Image: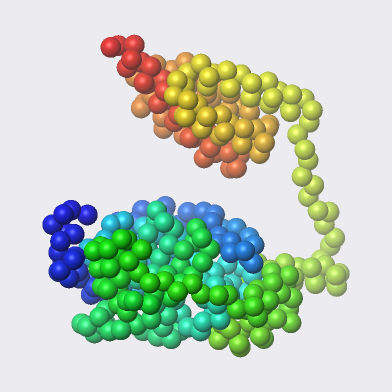
Amino acid sequence: MTAAAEEKARQGEGFDANVNDPSQALENLSEEENSVFTIVRLLSFSSMNLPDTPQDPHRNAALLAYTKSHWRWTHKLPAPWSSYWPHWENLHTFFYPTPLHMLLIPQIDIILNVRYAIPGEARPLMYNNELESWFFEVVERGSEPDKRVDAADRPKEIFYLDWKQEEMYRVKNAQTLREVAQRITEGDGLGSLELELLTPSPEGEAVIERLLDEDPTVMPTLIDDYLQYTPAPNEDLLSRLLDETDAFLGSEEEVAPEIELEPSEEVQAEGEEAYEEILRMLESDIADPEELAQAEELLETMKDATPEEMKPLHDLLKLLRETDPERFDEVKETMVERMKDLEAEIEQDAGELAELLMKSKKAAEMKGKE
């Protein structure tokens, strides 16, 4: 934040809290960001241990559309706070529907409605990716956003969720986003806010425990007393239960389950030898200690996940190592395509390892020319 912008914020100027049209920002999102299946990193409050969830591209697109139509986009927030929702790293963590036994429930609903027993819908105001925290207000579930000119300055109860500390607070000395932003700017950051630590509901946490234990009898209590809406069904689980029922009734022929075989001793030995040779290559070519440690960590992860892929990976890296650094840009696309032939679990790590190797080879080449 520049000194001039900071001075304006102190005086309450240059703070536009009206809803802004984010259509261009959404149009600039790559197709990959809208459709690729990723793994959502999940919030793990002490009483929660929820599974990782692959994203569905249609639900992902619906969530982005909802941020555009229902959440306020605010200019000139004190850096690094932002309300540019497509760049919020924890957007899907909190708002993407998570499979919990029979239902799909966004985790923020479990946190807000169940753990803290606060009814309503969380509507974000601004976030901080560095602190992994965000401010929000609570509105009536399903209500349309207030688009009146002075809506942003109407008093409201504001909450603050700190993911790192796994705590939620009520803001006591600010009732609008403008007030929160100005206190952060003109004072000691978050220290300028009076934050009341909220205590989880013991009854709510007991409901969460029953939900995680897949206790079907908790559903009426969860829906009627806490969420106050009926979530979408967990279709994958329902499909599996139907399949099991069909098999039990004999409507399908019995199919032997697939058995995941461990790599043979010969393959494991070959993988171990290739692993050791790759280690020697890395130690020889990567001069930076931090980058070498990163590369070794990637390699060990890949070996543990798919030891049978060490030999193909060794051959690819050896080919890359013997390539003239000046031709790296020419062969990079080919290398990426070859990496896709590896198992999906290590494809990304292998790409990062190749990038580190190319970077070090280029640096050594440049140093040799000086």
Q: Is 188 left, or right, of 91 in this rendering? A: left
Residue 351's x, y, as percent?
A: 49, 35
Residue 226's x, y, as percent?
A: 58, 83
Asked if one can make out residue 8 in the rendered structure from this viewpoint, the answer is yes
Q: Is residue 53 above or below residue 67?
A: above
Residue shown at the point (41%, 29%) measured from the top left: 332
Residue 223's x, y, as percent?
A: 61, 84
Residue 239 location, quadrant: bottom right
Q: Is 14 left, or right, of 45 in this rendering? A: left
Quarter of the image with the N terminus in it: bottom left
Q: Is 68 left, or right, of 311 in this rendering? A: left
Taking depth in this image into account, of 320 and 349 the one nearest to the observer is 349
Residue shown at the point (49%, 72%) measured from the top left: 197
Taking depth in this image into account, of 140 and 117 the one nearest to the observer is 117
Quarter of the image with the C terminus in it: top left
Q: Is residue 366 above or below residue 101?
A: above
Residue shown at the point (27%, 73%) measured from the top left: 179
